[in-house]
Image: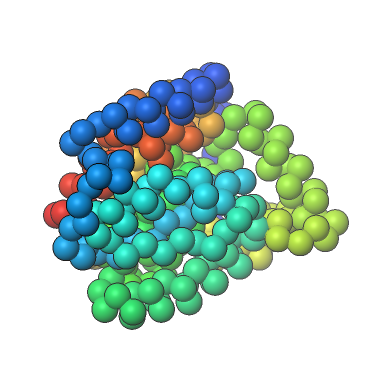
Amino acid sequence: MARIERWEAPVAPVWGELRYGSELARLLADQALSVLPRLRRRTLGPPVLLIPGFMAGDSSLAVMRAWLRRRGHPVSMSGLRLNAGCAEEIVSRLQQQLRGFAERSEEPVVLVGQSRGGALARSLAVREPESVCGLVMLGSPVRDPLAVSRQVMATVKLMARLGDIGVPRLFSSDCAEGECCESFWGDLEAPLPRGVEAVSVFSRSDGIVDWHACLDPHCRQVEVRSSHCGMSVHPSVYRLLTEILDG
């Protein structure tokens, strides 16, 4: 099993996550980003696959999905109602979805994943390089997926216990300690394919994960002043996406 670097995570105060509402309000008010429906549909842009974070579902990326569609991008969601299942099982399913989406679009796909969704997206980029042209990870602790706040760690342990006793669609202790997700852990350390523009977004004031764990050495690293949950609605992230998608 691949060894992931681990340390005691000096996570910022969790109350900083209360910024989400103000971050969304700033995005909606930003005339340059034109998130609101008045934006005209542009010429078809590169396809985008969105993957939500831990304990979240596709609905958590609804604002980003709407913005991308108004820009003219074909958008595919992960199909996850709750991102708490076995990583290897999720990635294996998403591989089939990604291939089909790229074939229908007749071009490679940009992957955007938040938190755990970014780690899943990175694994996809390693496994399916011909179907991927870009990777954007938002607050994804790929160097140590367990470098999280105490509150989140308590949830992780609870989910693992429930998975151990057979509750469906939840990861188990074997995902971290056994051979179940060995390939997935290896994907988090592997070099990314050439031709895939990869960006890791982090925030020093992230109240959920230790920002050091987001510093993927194989990616361009971009810092934003954002909460963890608010990265999916932060204006700086949307400007970065505009740069990547129009580039």
Q: Quadrant of the C terminus?
A: bottom left
Q: Is residue 218 visible?
A: no
Count of marks overlaid on the render? 0
Q: Image quarter for residue 148?
A: top right
**Residue depicted at 64% across the width and 35% down the height:** 152
**Residue depicted at 53% across the width and 31% down the height:** 208
Give the side of residue 160 with respect to residue 50, left or right: right
**Residue depicted at 21% across the width and 62% down the height:** 45
Colour pattern of the rendering: rainbow
Q: Image quarter for residue 165?
A: bottom right
- In the image shown, does 173 or 108 lie closer to the viewer? 108
Residue 128, horizontal then vertical, whole percent? 38, 72
Give the side of residue 50 with respect to residue 86, left or right: left
Give the side of residue 240 with respect to residue 83, left or right: left
Q: Is residue 225 above or below residue 217?
A: above
- In the image shown, does 23 or 112 lie closer to the viewer? 23
Residue 57, horizontal then vertical, whole percent? 56, 51
Q: Quadrant of the N terminus?
A: bottom right
Q: Image quarter for residue 168?
A: bottom right
